[in-house]
Amino acid sequence: MCADMVTNPAIPYSGPIPGGVFPSKTIHVQGFVPHGSQRFSVNLQCGVGIKGPDIAFHFNPRFQAGQNLIVCNTLSGGKWGAEERQHQSPFAHGQNFHIIIRCEQNSFKVAVNGRHFLEYYYRIHNLQSINAVMIDGTVTVYNIQYEPASAVYMPPQPAYPAAQPAYPAAQPAYPAAQPAYPHAAAPPAYPAGPKVVAYPALPYMDSIPGGMQAGKMIVVKVTVKPYPTRFHVNFQCGMCTNPRSDIAFHFNPRFNQQTIVMNTLRTTKWDGNEQKYRTYFPFFANGTYEIMFLCEHNQFKVALNGSHLLEYPHRLPFQNISALHIDGDVVVTEVKYH
């Protein structure tokens, strides 16, 4: 059986599509465009290989010579067809991206960074002949995810996958490991040499160096376990477990519900107005993620793999936050306190 997720593949990459292609099959590609990249491509092919197989769908962002466009095409019998070009490209140097390619009855539909982007009508109509993904060019790929994976044919659905019914407007990427988000006031300076904790055992509980301040950023890097149910990152007002300290910000991705639940715990009771982020669910089993939490005067901002994800307004004074607690179905590879 082919892997349902491919993580951090070397580029160029070519590999089989688990279960083949049929209407409702969906392919997710999450990655990063390095500075200086001139182009990269995501190809759905009729055979595994870097060169040789027919390409049913060639999706090709280009940046060279001042361009920023997408070229789509089909290679059949060694010959390219007529190009279809999109000049409003959502890709940019130094930014992360999330491409979703969904196979419909008559076309491929593509969403990028949470928005429907284009539709490409089939030129190779035998979907069973499409059985591989090939990615080439100057690009970093975090993971390739297939839905439904290793599964038999599923009836077609009218929109993008049920787990991801809609997507937020694309927003500028956040600079990796930088202490500020775009369009935010510059945070106060902190001493050089942030505290770094590598591979802590779970549950993880630790005090936040210097306490919580406006402009403080904490970066948590995790790898999700193969069969996850949920995990959480809690910003707590103390390290007590009995009675439990107040939790100013509870960040809780739930895989079984395909949502991110956020809440505040006061005097051992959860607030009644639980906040749920259901716009789309960005976490996958076996996926590797960098979650950035930035404390501002009025709210927390959260970025995922460098791109803005959500906000959570303060319900308790952020100055009361003194500890970080992490637990659940993940392996924590690093916690960095800036």
Image: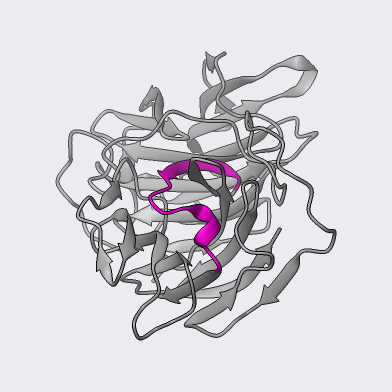
Image quadrant where residue 267 sits = bottom left
Residue 37 picture location, percent across and down: 75, 34
Is 206 positioned to the left or the right of 113 in the image?
right
Is 193 positioned to the left or the right of 211 in the image?
right
What residue sits 60% from the left and 81% below the top?
200
Residue 177 picture location, percent across and down: 71, 52
338 up-or-down from 68: above or below: below
Q: Residue furthest left?
A: 155
Residue 337 picture location, percent across and down: 68, 63
Nearest the camera: 138 or 268?
268
Numbered marks: total: 0
Residue 316 lies in the magenta stretch: yes
Nearest the camera: 246 or 169?
246
Residue 22 lies in the magenta stretch: no
Nearest the camera: 183 or 186?
186
What residue sits 23% from the left and 34% below the top?
159
278 up-or-down from 70: above or below: below
> Does the image show residue 3?
no
> Does the image show residue 264?
yes
65 up-or-down from 172: above or below: above
Q: Residue furthest right?
A: 192
Residue 252 picture location, percent across and down: 36, 62
Residues rendered magenta in the picture: 306-322
What residue sits 25% from the left and 63% below the top?
270
